[in-house]
Amino acid sequence: MTAGYMYKRHTDRFFKHFDFIIIDLICLQIAFVLAYAASGYGFNPYEIPLYSSMAVFIEVLDLVTLLLMDTMSGVLRRGVYKELVATFRHGAIIGVISVVVLFLLQQGQFYSRLAMFLTFAFYIALSFAARVAWKMLLLKHLAKDGDRVMLIVSTGDCVSKALDKIIANNYARYTIGGIALVDESRIGDTVDGVPVVADAESLPSLLCTEWIDEALVSVPADFESPMSLVESIAETGVAVHYGLSDSLRIPEMKQFIESIGDYTVITTSINYASMGQLFVKRVIDVGFGLVGCLATGIIAVVLAPVMFVESPGPLLYSQERVGRNGRHFKMYKFRSMYLDADERREELMGDNKFSDARMFKMDFDPRVIGNRILSDGSRKTGIGEFIRRTSIDEFPQFFNVLKGDMSVVGTRPPLVSETAFYEAHHRARLAIKPGITGLWQISGRSNITDFEEVVRLDREYINNWSIRLDLKILAKTVVVVLNQEGSV
């Protein structure tokens, strides 16, 4: 576990909507066959090797995309318009990737463009209609009768709020069997249409005589002996859910229950990731790491003789940085500065673009190889500035990615000396693996000179992390780097 970025140990969100996923996969294959037929080729596309291979590929791609983008998350809550947008976006992504793969494999000329277009047009229409229909069926079923009977155990001033939350989010298929008010006796009354069936005194006998599968206990934080109430219900064999008091909730934090040793604890973190998401992120890291290391070797062959002429010394530069949860590691870069750069940093702090010592950056750094001020006061840059502007110096960090010290996308790892000036909220930057690129880098890093803004961007990344966000940042990084190269 990390301190703030919790690794959730299951992929229950994926399996929670397994019925929607199966429906989506079926709709895609139906669309595939219909598109082939509408193109005038008949109803059996599977007899042609290219088409049968594409049928398998798009199914796998659909499943992977559903997992990566978490498309089905909140599917029961979405309205018709949002469902249409989500379905269209999902279908468009699969369609674009399929077309790209066909042309990369040089098979595009052998595949009907009309069939390809119709496949995803039909798929979007079928999937949208199936999702809406299945959702309406489920919600109708849930509204009438759930699979489990739940008793709401609460107080007079909290019960309406508890009912609202359960009814508005009754996606676990509960039938509300009644209300037990433990601070007053109102048996026979109703609250928002739900009957009050017990008070504190009659609750045990009710549990022994009526069909109750589970009970939700939602009482104020100052309620006397809430755990005694939970224990008395649990003794009857009824599963008890004890509502987390609002006083224990922390805004903008994720909270869930887990076991540590013999302790049952409430775990609070900035965000969490499922094992499936972490696996995919690591696969992406390894893939980019292997390609990046290969590119690093090629760049080194070209760069080494130039660097040796400009500044004799090692081509690679290692520096101790602070990684996830404060772990120290050696970060590698192509050397773009003179050998005495670290020693000269202190004397240049007055020219730091940042207002404090928690980060360091200069518009024109004389420690960079080839940088110098001419006699007329003009500035001349050299090879060091070029490899920094084009981010060539970052390539050796792909070795750090393969080692597991870093990720391709994350927050930038600070120097050990910089963390000495951190305040408590700054440490949130260290809650995940540092990255080669990140939200700060694509948000105009050269123009951001406020360290608090850097921290805000890092926390925004952590709070909203997803595989889709990582892919978006990677795509924008390519654009930023290309623009930098064009301005050199």
Image (tube, grey):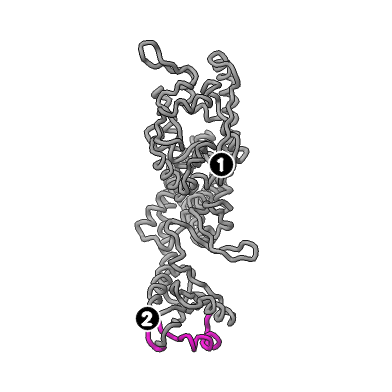
Q: Residues within 10 Å of mark 1 (few under 14, many from 20)?
A: many
- For residue 31, the mark is none
Mark 1 in CB contact with mark 2 (< 8 angstroms) = no
Q: Nearer the viewer, mark 1 or mark 2?
A: 1
Q: Which residues are magenta?
A: 187-212
Instruction: Tell me, yes or no, if residue 39 can be seen here.
Output: no
Q: How many marks?
A: 2
Mark closer to the chain start, 1 or 2: 2
Displayed quadrant of residue 445 = top left
Q: Is residue 199 magenta?
A: yes
What percent of the width, then of the height, locates residue 424? 47, 48
Closer to the camera, 146 or 59?
146
The residue depicted at 44 percent of the width and 49 percent of the height is: 91
Seen in the picture, residue 387 relative to 111 is either above or below; the reply is: above
Residue 191 image label = 2
- Which residue occupies the foreground of this view, 39 or 394? 394
In the picture, which quadrant includes the C terminus?
top left
Q: Residues within 10 Å of mark 2 (few under 14, many from 20)?
A: some
Q: Is residue 39 magenta?
A: no
Question: Quick check: can you spot residue 68?
Answer: yes
Furthest residue in direction right, as rendered: 261
The residue singled out by tag 1 in the image is 323
Q: Amino acid at mark 2?
A: Val
Image height of 321 relative to 121, above or below = above
User: Residue 412: x and y, percent?
Assistant: 50, 38
The residue depicted at 56 percent of the width and 81 percent of the height is: 232
C-alpha separation, residue under disc 1 versus residue under disc 2: 53 Å
Q: Amino acid at mark 1?
A: Gly
Residue furthest to the top in view is 375
Q: What x and y, as percent, mark residue 175?
A: 46, 77
Residue 64 spot, x, y in % from top left:
53, 49
